[in-house]
Every structure is written in C-alpha cells, then in structure tokens.
C-alpha cells in the first residue's frame, strides 16, 4: 500500500505518503530535514513498512507541499505534524525526524505528548547559540543573492561524508534535485523557526520515550550538543553512528536502521 495525498491546512496543503501496513498497525511518522523531502526516508520506509503503517510528508515549502507566507515557527511546524496525523485518522504514533524534522519532533513531544508514543530525534539541536544564528543569516543572504542552488555545495559538504558522496552519485543526484525544489521562501521561513529554537531548557519536562541519534562527523548537530540534549531528557537514550555526517539515515543506513528498529520495536 503506497499512496500520496494532499493534507489541507489553512490556505495551503502538504503532500504526504502512506505505505507499509494497513489500518490497525502501529504508525510511524517520518519528518524530513530542511532542504530535503519525504523521499530522503525511502530506505527506512521500506525497512519499517514490514512492521508499521508508515506516513511521511514534505515539510511546508519543500517537495510537493505548498509554501505559505513566512516566517514560520516551531508551533506552525508542530501544527502541521498534528494535521498530518489527523488527516490519516492517527491518534498516536512514533515520530522519527532528522534535523528540522527532529526538532519538530521535540515540539511534538513537549507540546503534544499525547500524540507521540516514542520519539526518535536525529541530527538535531535544541538551542540556537550565536554561531548557529549567524549561519542561517548567511545562508538566507546567499539565497537572496544567488538562489537556492547557491548554497547547495556547502550543504552537501555538511550532509554526507566525502567518501560516501564519491561512492553513491545516484543518492547525491536525488538529494540535489530535491534541494533545488525547495522554495527560497520556504527555506527562509523554516530558517526563522530554527533561529527561534529554544527547546533545551524544556527537555527536563519530556515524558515521551526518546532516542537521540547523532552522526559522529556531523558539523550541523555535533555529538556534544546531542549528548547535552540526552543528558537533559529524562530516561532518554543516545546512539552515535560512526563515519556519518548530517543525513545519517542515508550516510550510514545499516547502523542507523539497527539503532532505529531496536528502539521502536522494543
């Protein structure tokens, strides 16, 4: 079972896909990184589909989803996630998100805990220190000057290790295409949410079972930052994946999938 649908929001819609098991099976929601689409989860959709009803969606401003006027907040992005669940008649689900999707998952766990069974937060931060803030200002300025493609080379360098890029040109090509489909307004709108990131001080209130997954070579969400999030989150677990940069699930799929399925199936 695989189908794409439009999830209606206030004046715009999100593109979503359902696959895997049918109604009655436990549900996993997949939420993408800034600049990617739900297709970044293709290997995990296949792996998880044997056990779960799997629902992925393109974040607003990404892929086949619409781009409402920005800026956005994490409250907006969490509301989008809830709308996707409501559209599919899902009351509770596991949430698996990477980078922006992982941060949205933190918001789900903190502000809508009754909707989340387990949370897997990958390659994410929970705060916005000054260098982090400046990085988004620089990228937005570059997009205004040269378009979304102008920041792709630096993004790719952060997303995947050099060895992986050389060995997997087809994955690089797909990510390049998906990144180019991200609208400048959508990217900037989501960047505004990231600049307002302030979940770290609230992680002590998290009641949802949480797994953090960090890439050992990730420059965007360093291991130290994710270890601090783990330390602040009661009862949480952390897995550090060797030889992986920011898009961990593609860069090191075997180790990533092992950590993911062990946690979700426990």
Image: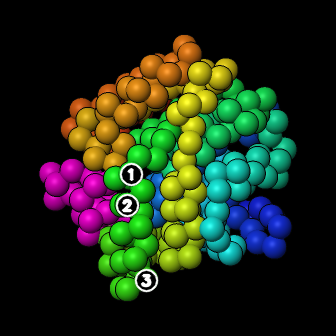
**Vertical side of 202 occupied by 198: above or below:** below
Q: In which quarter of the image is the C terminus?
A: top right
Estimate the x, y position of residue 190 in percent, counting from the top left.
Answer: 56, 62
Mark 2 or mark 3, which is nearer to you? 2
Q: What element carries label 1?
A: helix
Estimate the x, y position of residue 41 in percent, counting from the top left.
Answer: 49, 50
Residue name at image x 83 percent, y 67 percent: 10
Cα distance in 3D space between marks 2 and 3: 15 Å
Magenta part of the protein: which range?
153-175
The residue wearing badge 1 is 130
Q: Does the magenta stretch include residue 174?
A: yes
Q: Does the magenta stretch include residue 166?
A: yes
Mark 1 or mark 3, which is nearer to you? 1
Residue name at image x 65 percent, y 56 percent: 73
**Vertical side of 34 occupied by 209: above or below:** above
The residue wearing badge 2 is 134
How packed mark 1 is, by other alpha carbons closer than 10 Å (few <14, some 14-19, many 20 or more), is few
């Amino acid at each position: 079972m695989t189908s794409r649908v439009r999830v209606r929001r206030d004046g715009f819609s999100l593109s979503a896909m359902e696959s895997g098991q049918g109604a009655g099976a436990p549900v996993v929601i997949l939420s993408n990184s800034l600049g990617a689409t739900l297709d970044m989860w293709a290997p995990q959709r296949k792996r998880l589909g044997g056990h779960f009803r799997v629902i992925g969606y393109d974040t607003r401003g990404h892929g086949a989803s619409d781009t409402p006027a920005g800026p956005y907040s994490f409250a907006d992005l969490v509301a989008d996630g809830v709308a996707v669940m409501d559209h599919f008649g899902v009351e509770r689900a596991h949430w698996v998100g990477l980078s922006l999707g992982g941060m949205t998952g933190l918001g789900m766990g903190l502000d809508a805990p009754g909707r989340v069974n387990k949370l897997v937060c990958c390659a994410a931060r929970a705060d916005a220190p000054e260098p982090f803030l400046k990085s988004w200002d620089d990228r937005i300025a570059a997009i205004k000057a040269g378009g979304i493609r102008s920041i792709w080379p630096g993004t790719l360098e952060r997303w995947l290790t050099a060895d992986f890029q050389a060995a997997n040109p087809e994955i690089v090509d797909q990510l390049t295409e998906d990144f180019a489909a991200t609208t400048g307004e959508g990217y900037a709108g989501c960047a505004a949410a990231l600049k307002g990131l302030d979940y770290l001080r609230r992680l002590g209130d998290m009641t949802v079972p949480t797994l953090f997954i960090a890439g050992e070579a990730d420059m965007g969400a360093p291991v130290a930052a994710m270890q601090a999030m783990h330390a602040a989150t009661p009862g949480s677990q952390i897995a550090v994946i060797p030889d992986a940069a920011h898009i961990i699930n593609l860069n090191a799929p075997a180790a990533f999938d092992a950590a993911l399925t062990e946690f979700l199936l426990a």
